[in-house]
Amino acid sequence: MCRNIRTLYNFEPPATEDEVHAAAVQYVRKISGFTRPSRANEAAFEAAVKAITATSRELLASLETNAPPKDREIEAAKARARAQQRYAA
């Protein structure tokens, strides 16, 4: 998975439209190999981002869990601690 795509499910507050769209853009970039598509491929690229954004929203809305929502700040602190340990000199 692309390192820039983050888990969006079961967080408080829920994922925003911008976060879902950004994840879709990263996914399409990863599988297409384009950071920025050419004019010839721009329409296909944007259509794919739109479709994946919609599908991701549907998925997030339909998932169910009994686990309590995760706190974004706590999860970010855990990620920073893992990164610090991983990249410590």
Image: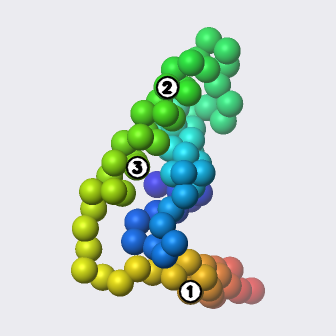
Judged from this view, the residue extending furthest toward the right is: 89
| Kind of residue indicated by mark 3 | Arg
Total numbered badges shown on the rendered structure: 3
- From the viewer's perspective, tell me whether residue 23 is left or right of residue 65: right
Residue for point 51% across, 72% down: 13
Give the mark nearer the N terminus: 3 vs 1: 3
Kind of element beneath mark 3: helix
- From the viewer's perspective, tell me whether residue 27 is left or right of residue 55: right
State the separation of the CA atoms marked 2 and 3: 15 Å
Task: Name the foreground residue: 78 vs 87.
Answer: 78
| Kind of residue indicated by mark 1 | Ile
Q: Residue 60: name its quadrant.
A: bottom left
Is 48 situated above or below 79?
Answer: above
Residue labelled with disc 1:
74
* Residue 41 appears in the rendering: yes
Kind of element beneath mark 2: helix
Kind of element beneath mark 1: helix
Residue for point 48% across, 67% down: 14
Q: Please identify, in this view, whether the residue under mark 2 or under mark 3 is nearer the observer.
A: 3
Residue labelled with disc 3:
57
Give the mark nearer the N terminus: 2 vs 1: 2
Residue for point 48% across, 75% down: 12
Marks 3 and 1 close (CB-CB < 8 Å) = no
Residue labelled with disc 2:
47
- From the viewer's perspective, tell me whether residue 59 is left or right of residue 4: left
Task: Name the foreground residue: 15 vs 25.
Answer: 15
Give the mark nearer the N terminus: 2 vs 3: 2
State the separation of the CA atoms marked 2 and 1: 35 Å
| Kind of residue indicated by mark 2 | Ala
Q: Would you call the spot at circle 3 few (<14 residues within 10 Å), some (14-19), or many (20 or more)?
A: some
State the separation of the CA atoms marked 3 and 1: 24 Å
